Amino acid sequence: MDDKVAIIALHRVEGIGSAIKRRLVDMHENLAPLFLGKVKLGDDRVYKKIVAFKGWKDIDRDMKKISDMGAEILTIKDREYPDQLRNIPDAPIVMYKKGRLKIGADTIAIVGSRAASFESINMAEKIAQTLSSSGITVISGLARGVDAAAHKGALKEKGKTVGVLGCGIDICYPAENRPLFKKIEEDGCILSEYGLGEPPLPHHFPMRNRIIAGLSKGVLVVEASQRSGSLITARLGLEYGREVMAIPGNIFDEGYRGTNSLIKQGAKLIDGIEDIITACFSGLTFKTDKHVDLDNNERYIYGIIGSTKIHVDEVVEKSGMETKHVMAILTNLELKEAIKGIPGGFYLRI
């Protein structure tokens, strides 16, 4: 029996935890004898579950399907398996991967609420793009909200992104993210420990979060309530010795209670991208903003607009200029992709 097939089989044995499976792989040079009953284990329950495994035909079928779809199966013994993930105690012994991106050491997890505010979504996208421009790979969970924004921002630059799923790599969840899913397959990569056809069951996502934390040098939480799954990722990051960071928010907004609580508990408060670089990527040079040529009036209005949304009436009031003149400048700034208009007459920097 091929050792890779034996590792895949062990991965599929139910009722044995990830940490135990990892220890078995570390303890045995070849796992095939375990399935043949030739090695007696100290834990009789684990031994019985392994020798009772019958899913060999399913493995053969899935290996062919994986190959046909241009994907691959990585075992924890493979050279291509990400080193940072390999070093956590409960690392999955098998990962399914779709996409050509090689996952290196310069990685960061950006996570947050599925129902995030527009400001947080914009912030996540901008931070991800800036970090990706310096070759940092952004890890997230391909959920709606902050996760999707982080993936979108990272895809615009060279660092690209990794989407970690709580289902098989042949399933896009949520379905609304299908265009983003396809783009990550092409320019980044999709990862999952779940086999083909595995649905996105609720208990899969906390398990998925350990992979997000394990792959990353640091975990940045952009917006999260007290019950957000992002806090699980942050807690796991602490357990794995990762830098945990959070962006503070409105103390009266329930959506920020989780991030503000993380900061109270010792997470690094982030009020600029430089803080992330210092915490996780010291010595790395990075671009703070893309260069945009602005005339004096455009620069003046741009200075009034911040990273949080501001209404056009407030821009006019602060500028002291005529409304029609301000509107013309705002249009030019949008065309130059320096700012973004939001429904309701609001603007913010990109």
Image (spheres, rainbow, N blue to C red):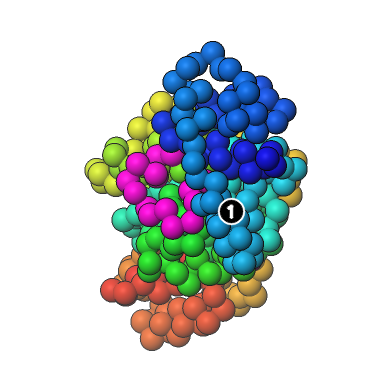
Residue behind mark 1: 60
Residue at the farthest top position: 42
Seen in the image, is 69 located left or right of residue 249?
right
**Which image quadrant is residue 9 in?**
top right
Residue 289's x, y, as percent?
Answer: 62, 61
Q: Is residue 194 magenta?
A: yes
Q: Residue at x 63, y 51 (%)?
A: 73
Q: Residue at x 63, y 72 (%)?
A: 292
Q: Nearer the viewer, residue 71 or 85?
A: 71
Q: Residue at x 44, y 39 (%)?
A: 207
Q: Residue at x 61, y 60 (%)?
A: 64
Above or below 95: residue 156: below
Residue 270's x, y, as percent?
Answer: 50, 41
Q: Is residue 204 magenta?
A: yes
Within 10 Å of disc 1 (Cα), the crowding (few <14, some 14-19, many 20+) is few
> Which residue range is magenta in the image?
187-207
Above or below 41: residue 114: below
Q: Nearer the viewer, residue 341 or 254?
A: 254
Above or below 173: residue 192: above
What amino acid is found at the position of numbered circle 1 in the picture? Asp
Secondary structure state at the residue bearing disc 1: helix
Residue 134's x, y, as percent?
Answer: 70, 55
Q: Nearer the viewer, residue 41 or 189?
A: 41
Any part of residue 204 in sight = yes
Q: Nearer the viewer, residue 342 or 164?
A: 164
